[in-house]
Amino acid sequence: MKKNGFTMIELLAVITILGIIAGIAVTSFQSVTNNAKKKTYQDFETSMESAANNYLMEYMEEIPDVESEIKISADTLVEKGFLETMADPDKNGSTCDHNSYVLVQRNAATGGGYNLNLKYTPCLVCSKYQSCH
């Protein structure tokens, strides 16, 4: 008598192999997703620094005195048109604008000339990410 089909052992082996492949694929996908979110946060911080620099070029009266600092909120940068709204990659419909800011410190100028020696430190606050120190 000729039997057609697969044995139970063969089916279990195939299902096990497919499960292992699926596990590897899910882990890889999560890693790629997490790296993309991390890169997005870093891009937001870079954008905030550039926006604060452009903001101070237009509102020069707000440049801090030597050895002092100011805080420029992300909301202000968005409102004045220097920064796009930053959509939170971890939470649909939410943004990272409301509690985020850029701290601008001015140290003593070195080498003379027009060097203001400004240091920009972004503080990005999102639902699952915060870069403030």
Image (spheres, rainbow, N blue to C red):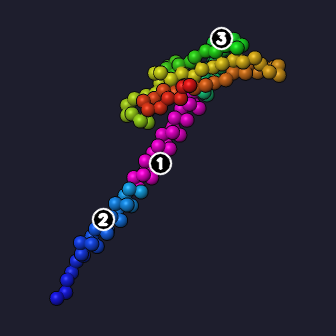
Tell me the residue at 56%/18% (across/down): 72
Provide the secondary structure element on which disc 1 rests: helix
Q: Nearer the viewer, mark 2 or mark 3?
A: 2
Whether residue 82 is visible here, answered yes or no, is no
Q: Main secondary structure of the magenta part?
A: helix
Instruction: Looking at the picture, tell me which residue is in the foreground, 133 or 104.
Output: 133
What amino acid does circle 1 point to?
Val
Which label number is shown at residue 15?
A: 2
Residue 36, position in %: x, y? Answer: 49, 43
Q: Is residue 60 left or right of residue 110?
A: left
Whether residue 127 sits left or right of residue 120 in the image: it is left
| Foreground pick, 52 / 34 | 34
Q: State the residue in front, 86 or 33.
A: 33
- Tell me the distance, in whole angstroms, between the alpha carbons under discs 1 and 2: 26 Å
Q: Whole-Å distance between the Cαs marked 2 and 3?
A: 69 Å
* Residue segment shown in magenta: 25-48
Quadrant of the image containing the N terminus: bottom left
The extreme front residue here reads: 9
Give coordinates of residue 92: x percent, y percent: 37, 34
User: Badge 2 local density, few (<14 within 10 Å), some, or many (20+)?
Assistant: few
81, above or below 22, in the image: above
- Residue at numbered disc 3: 61
User: Residue 62, image x and y in percent?
Assistant: 63, 12
Q: Which residue is mark 1?
A: 32
Image location (x, y in percent) of residue 119: 67, 23
Quadrant position of residue 43: top right
Q: Is residue 20 left or right of residue 77?
A: left
Q: Residue at x 56, y 25 (%)?
A: 133
- Specify whether residue 11 is painted magenta: no
